[in-house]
Image (cartoon, grey):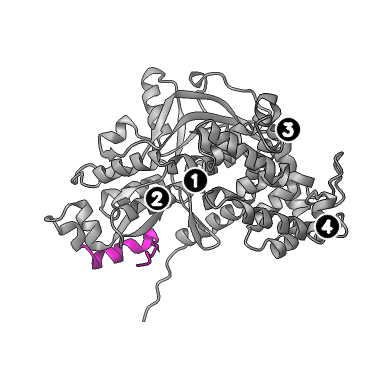
């Protein structure tokens, strides 16, 4: 039976629960039995590219992907029902009032929260990081900041500051409600606040959109991220959750998801990012219709990110190796895909998309769908033969040749005679290829954010719009 994914807006919850309030009143059934009787797992979350969001009508996000698989582990006919909230306070209220079965939104397992809630196993860690604006004095210690710090109300960062205030009474900060971490960082970038205390992963991702923000320092110890369950109900859901994460870790699924959502987060380049954002405005609009026209089954934004890495969207770009054009095609590749003029933007984009698609089709079927594109991009840059060589080297080192996270770390071996002598195609610039793919993933993430930011703005406008009542 095909499982159906349902999406509910928080504003509709009260009416729905009035019709299905019997769920909480079924004392004879434990939490898992209630989920199975209902036929759905209700998961509270927050809108964010890392947790849950909609792209082209499809649900995505790390927490969404894990929750989808977890719901399937509870029964063949259990549908996943994502219930997005617009603030931390609203999110916790969903769980407190029994409107959802659990929360999955990058929540930190803190001492204060453990007094009220139960947590599942950790699936990654973050560090509290102080962000400041480039060009201003870099702060050295949190104790020196008696003003200007902004955090989210109810966040783990706010909890940490409350604890620190017991030691440093002079500490002062502003806690904002009905906001998110990216909005706090935007305020720093736009000089509306001096500092924001956020988690390091969100800061690293957000620097791609607001390049004027920088990390000053981290505070405290690494913090565990985990799903949250109510404490005053039975723990029947915790057992399956523990087993689920153990399985996801042992079968490599968790590692693949980490690579997908965190693998491209790397050292930040201010000049490169600023230039890229400028060219999104002044160059991309001219070529976007071509990327959309020839992307085919690919995401046009991925194709555009790839083209930017190759040529910075310059149709006359030429490399010292002789590759040319928007997609930097060699003469042989151009002939293979029917491109007669590599400097013609339309021909180059069409040919590059066609060539990348052909590489995807030639990759081994054992590579998971979610990772095939990274292998294909590497092959576009270095050649499919070299990528297959690295897969064989990876396997010879008792690692997974179908895992991009492991294969990319072995790409530099193609520089070393000890290793490339064992390969079919020999020496290659593997380090450059690793950087090539990482850069594209960063550019792609920035382009996705443009759409996410607009969609998030529209959702907030709808959420905050007043209800108009009409007398009948």
Q: Residue at 63%, 42% (x, y): give it.
A: 388
Q: Which residue is mark 3?
A: 427
Numbered disc 2: secondary structure = strand
Q: CA distance from mark 1 to mark 2?
A: 11 Å
Q: Earlier in the sequence, mark 3 or mark 2?
A: 2
**Cβ atoms at labels 3 and 2 below 8 Å apart:** no
Q: CA distance from mark 3 to mark 2?
A: 47 Å
**Up-down relation of residue 196 to residue 304 (above or below):** above
The x, y position of residue 413, in whole percent, is 65, 29
Query: Is residue 142 located in the magenta-colored stretch of the structure?
Result: no
Quarter of the figure that contains the C terminus: bottom left
Asked whether residue 265 appears in the rendered view, the answer is no
Going by the image, does 418 lie left or right of 70?
A: right
Q: Which residue is mark 2?
A: 45
Query: Is residue 16 located in the magenta-colored stretch of the structure?
Result: yes
Q: Earlier in the sequence, mark 4 or mark 2?
A: 2
Q: Nearer the observer, disc 1 or disc 2?
A: 1
Q: Which residue is mark 4?
A: 335
Boundaries of the magenta span? 1-21
């Amino acid at each position: 039976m095909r499982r159906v994914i349902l999406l509910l807006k928080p504003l509709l919850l009260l009416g729905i629960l009035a019709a299905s309030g019997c769920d909480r009143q079924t004392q004879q059934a434990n939490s898992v039995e209630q989920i199975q009787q209902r036929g759905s797992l209700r998961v509270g979350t927050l809108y964010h590219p890392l947790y849950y969001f909609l792209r082209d009508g499809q649900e995505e996000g790390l927490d969404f992907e894990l929750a989808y698989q977890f719901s399937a582990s509870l029964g063949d006919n259990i549908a996943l029902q994502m219930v997005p909230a617009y603030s931390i306070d609203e999110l916790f209220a969903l769980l407190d009032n029994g409107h959802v079965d659990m929360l999955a939104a990058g929540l930190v397992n803190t001492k204060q929260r453990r007094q009220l809630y139960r947590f599942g196993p950790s699936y990654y860690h973050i560090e509290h990081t102080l962000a400041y604006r480039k060009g201003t004095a870099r702060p050295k210690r949190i104790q020196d900041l008696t003003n200007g710090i902004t955090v989210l109300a109810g966040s783990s960062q706010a909890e940490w500051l409350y604890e620190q205030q017991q030691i440093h009474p002079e500490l002062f900060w502003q806690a904002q409600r009905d906001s998110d971490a990216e909005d706090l960082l935007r305020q720093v970038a736009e000089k509306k606040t001096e500092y924001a205390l956020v988690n390091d992963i969100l800061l690293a991702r957000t620097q791609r959109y607001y390049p004027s923000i920088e990390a000053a320092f981290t505070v405290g110890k690494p913090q565990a991220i985990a799903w949250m369950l109510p404490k005053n109900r039975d723990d029947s859901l915790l057992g399956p959750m523990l087993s689920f994460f153990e399985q996801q870790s042992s079968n490599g699924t968790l590692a693949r998801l980490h690579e997908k959502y965190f693998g491209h987060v790397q050292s930040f380049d201010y000049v490169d990012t600023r230039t890229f954002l400028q060219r999104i405005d002044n160059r991309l609009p001219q070529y976007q219709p071509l990327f959309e026209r020839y992307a085919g089954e690919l995401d046009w934004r991925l194709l555009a990110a790839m083209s930017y890495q190759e040529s910075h969207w310059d149709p006359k770009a030429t490399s010292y190796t002789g590759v040319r054009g928007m997609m930097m095609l060699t003469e042989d590749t151009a002939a293979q895909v029917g491109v007669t003029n590599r400097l013609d933007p339309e021909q180059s984009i069409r040919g590059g998309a066609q060539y990348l698609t052909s590489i995807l089709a030639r990759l081994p079927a054992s590579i998971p769908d979610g990772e095939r594109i990274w292998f294909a991009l590497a092959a576009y840059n270095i050649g499919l033969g070299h990528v297959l060589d690295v897969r064989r080297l990876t396997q010879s080192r008792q690692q997974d040749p179908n895992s991009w996270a492991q294969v990319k770390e072995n790409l530099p071996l193609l520089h070393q005679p000890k290793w490339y002598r064992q390969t079919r195609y020999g020496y290659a610039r593997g380090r450059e290829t690793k950087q090539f793919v990482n850069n594209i993933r960063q550019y792609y993430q920035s382009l996705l954010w443009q759409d996410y930011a607009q969609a998030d703005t529209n959702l907030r406008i709808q959420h905050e719009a007043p209800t108009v009542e009409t007398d009948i």
